[in-house]
Image (tube, rainbow, N blue to C red):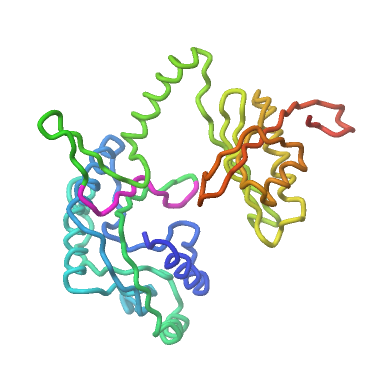
Amino acid sequence: MVPGAAAVEINGLRRALSSFDIDRIGPHVTVVPPVNVPEDQVAEVCAAVRSAAAEFPPLALELGPPKSFLPASPVCYLAVKGSDSALTLLATLARRLARGPLGPPASRAVQPFVPHVTLNRNMEPGELALALTVLAGYRAQVVFEDVTLLEYDQTERRWRSLLAVPLRLPATVGRGGVEIELSLSRQLDPVALEWSRREWEQFSVKQYGVRFRADEPLVITARIRGLVVGVAELELRGDTTRLARLMVGAGHRGSGVGRQLLRAVEDEAAERGCFRVRLEALAGSPAESFYRSRGYEVAATLPRWREERDLVVLEKQVVLLRYPSDQASEAYE
């Protein structure tokens, strides 16, 4: 996946070229084309990706200028360039990964490996020619530090990250006894995720008793005329709901979106048997003032929690009261 600011910039190009894939997949260099993998082979694929990533260093590459695959297909893409050694490593990585479950099906015609970042995969010839002319000077220097395994979500009709592994050798410790391999990744792979869930559940039941309720993540999204204007991310933790993040778009702040999102969080907490909402905010910030104005009180301070600045833990007791249908449906204390 194209990292950081370069991804934001390239998404701007994709939007300007009316790409329909912006919400389906982020800017990326395809190393292995999409392939169907049986569910019972996902663990094998994750292991293969981790193993391959451990053999390669980060790759410094240049993206641009735009090119096309005409006359074969009306795709507008950014060429991938770099030193001979970097391009050789990228091609070798592609060959290394295209094995076993990730290998191409027998029915797929063999195609040469042309690394690229797709901007729009279906453009009218005239528009494509104009785009190639207007964007001819575009270049972006990027260092790729990860290999990402994507899975297509049929329900949401988009690609989501299943595993992201840094291009680096894993550390091995404990030589002379039991050798332990410590591998770094951006997220847990499905096998490690299932192990973590199972072990944590067993530990939590032992720690808190059989009535322990596993954490439940939820997201509340605010839209105006179909456009996202705010998001609240929360976790149900027993009797407490933790508000992990509440964001409102810059153009809609002060319009009541934040208040409605927060009220929805409190409503959901009370509906699900929680009596407390807890969150963290930067001490002395407008966010702290906002929550205080909504009845939240400081329960603790986290000194030098982020960027050497203090955070405050804010809490509010919530109770859901039901009224007749012709009155307000809920109230909070």
Q: Is residue 63 above or below residue 94?
A: below
Residue at 66 percent across and 36 percent down: it is 314
Q: Residue 118 vs residue 98: left or right?
A: right
Quarter of the picture holding the C terminus: top right
- In percent of width and height, residue 292 lies at 74, 41
Q: Residue 36 vs residue 158: left or right?
A: left
Taking the magenta stretch, the answer to whether it contains residue 164 is yes
Q: Which residues are magenta?
A: 156-169
Question: How many labels sit on residues?
Answer: 0
Q: Hey, which quadrant is residue 263 in on the image? A: top right
Residue at 34 percent across and 37 percent down: it is 190
Q: Is residue 303 above or below residue 4?
A: above
Residue at 21 percent across and 45 percent down: it is 170
- In percent of width and height, residue 243 lies at 61, 38
Taking the magenta stretch, the answer to whether it contains residue 102 is no
Residue at 43 percent across and 22 percent down: it is 201
- In percent of width and height, residue 285 lies at 66, 51
Q: Is residue 39 above or below residue 61?
A: above
Q: In front: 10, or 141?
A: 141
Q: Hey, which quadrant is residue 48 in on the image? A: top left
Residue at the extreme top: 210
Quarter of the picture holding the N terminus: bottom left
